[in-house]
Image (cartoon, rainbow, N blue to C red):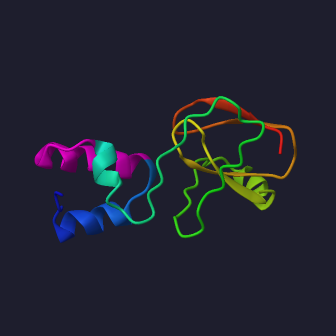
Amino acid sequence: MTIISPDEYDLLMSLSGQEQNLQAANIGKKYRLTEKQILAMLPDYAAPANTNNTSNNRNFATANRPRFEYDPSPDASQRRREISQAITCPSCAAELGIPSIRPIRVTCPQCSQEHTFYE
């Protein structure tokens, strides 16, 4: 098994989302591994499941990973107060905060995919 350097490991652990994926791809080129093989070396990494049925799918974000704020608009603070749940995007595994209103249609700011959640 290939072992990446401690500095590269620390860098990957400090990143999340798309930044982590891009860095894993760069490190993978150095070791001739795929991005998924590099990410699989991380302790909290879970490969995103490919599922077409989002109505019964509960993809909750992990509590130990940082959250990012995507909306810089003035009314964003009001919407942030309405957030009561954390989910991961079924397409790209980006972490999203949503209110408890159901059904809710969410457009992921990272991959621009639209998903509807019923539960």
Could you tell me which quadrant the C terminus lies in?
top right
100 lies left or right of 59: right
Q: Residue furthest front?
A: 1
- Which of 55 and 7 lies nearest the eye of the viewer? 55
Residue 49 place in picture, x, y as percent: 54, 41
Name the residue: 83% across, 39% down: 118
Assess whether residue 33 is covered by the magenta stretch: yes
84 lies left or right of 8: right
Name the residue: 62% across, 47% down: 71
**Count of labels in the image:** 0
103 lies left or right of 117: right
- Which of 117 and 108 lies nearest the eye of the viewer? 117
21 lies left or right of 89: left
Assess whether residue 24 is covered by the magenta stretch: yes
Could you tell me which quadrant the N terminus lies in?
bottom left
Residue 39 place in picture, x, y as percent: 34, 53
**Numbered range of the magenta stretch:** 18-34
Q: Can you say whether 91 is above or below 78 in the image?
A: above
Name the residue: 53% across, 45% down: 93
> Which secondary structure class fits the magenta region best?
helix
The quarter holding residue 26 reads top left
The quarter holding residue 64 reads bottom right
Q: Can you say whether 104 is above or below 58 in the image?
A: above
